[in-house]
Image (tube, grey):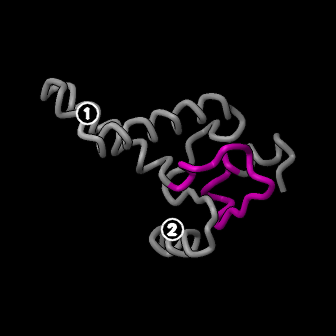
Amino acid sequence: FADLVSRAAIKARCHYVNKKWLGGMLTNWSTTKKGLHKLRDLKIKHKMGRLKQLKKRDVTGLKRQLAHLQEYLGGIKYMTRLPDIVIILDQHKEYIALLECITLGIP
């Protein structure tokens, strides 16, 4: 099911969250922006080969952090501001997302 959501969102060129909704993803947007910046920064460092200059233990930790950020924030990595609208497929399961949207007035 999560695969279908991601493929449809990518095809439609939309942002998506297909894993567990992180509480405060929208209401605590400043913290989410820092995580997105960290994700982009780590991806660039990984592509440029800058991680090879670090110790093996540090590289392992950064790769683990990159994988975690990619898993939970990968679908919104290019999001620069709060969305105008949010589509929630399972409102009972993603109740936190629903509450955040209500709090921020996002339809």
Where does residue 103 sit, x and y in percent of width and height? 82, 40
- As drawn, which residue projects farthest toward the front? 48
Q: Is residue 12 above or below residue 35?
A: below
Answer left or right for 101 relative to 93. right
Q: Residue at x 48, y 73 (%)?
A: 1
The secondary structure making up most of the magenta span is loop
Q: Residue at x 53, y 48 (%)?
A: 77
- Please say if 59 is above or below 85: above
Give the quadrant of residue 93: bottom right
Q: Residues within 10 Å of mark 1 (few under 14, many from 20)?
A: few
Sequence order check, earlier mark of 1 and 2: 2
Determine the residue positioned at 54% across, 69% down. Answer: 10
The C terminus lies in which quarter of the figure?
bottom right
Residue situated in front as seen by the camera: 6 or 46: 46
Tag 2 secondary structure: helix
Indicate whether residue 93 is drawn in magenta. yes
Mark pair 1, 2: CA separation: 29 Å
Task: Please state the horizontal and vertical placement of residue 20, each as a whole percent of the image.
Answer: 51, 51
Residue at x 45%, y 71% (from the top left corner): 3
Q: Residue at label 1?
A: 50
Q: Nearer the viewer, mark 1 or mark 2?
A: 1
Q: Nearer the viewer, residue 82 or 54?
A: 54
Q: Which mark is residue 16?
A: none
Residue 79 included in the magenta stretch of the image: yes
Q: Tag 1: residue type?
A: Arg
Residue 21 image point, x, y percent:
56, 48
Closer to the camera in the image, 41 or 35: 41
**What span is in magenta?**
75-97
The three-letter code of the residue at mark 2 reads Ser
Identify residue for label 2: 6
Q: Secondary structure at mark 1?
A: helix
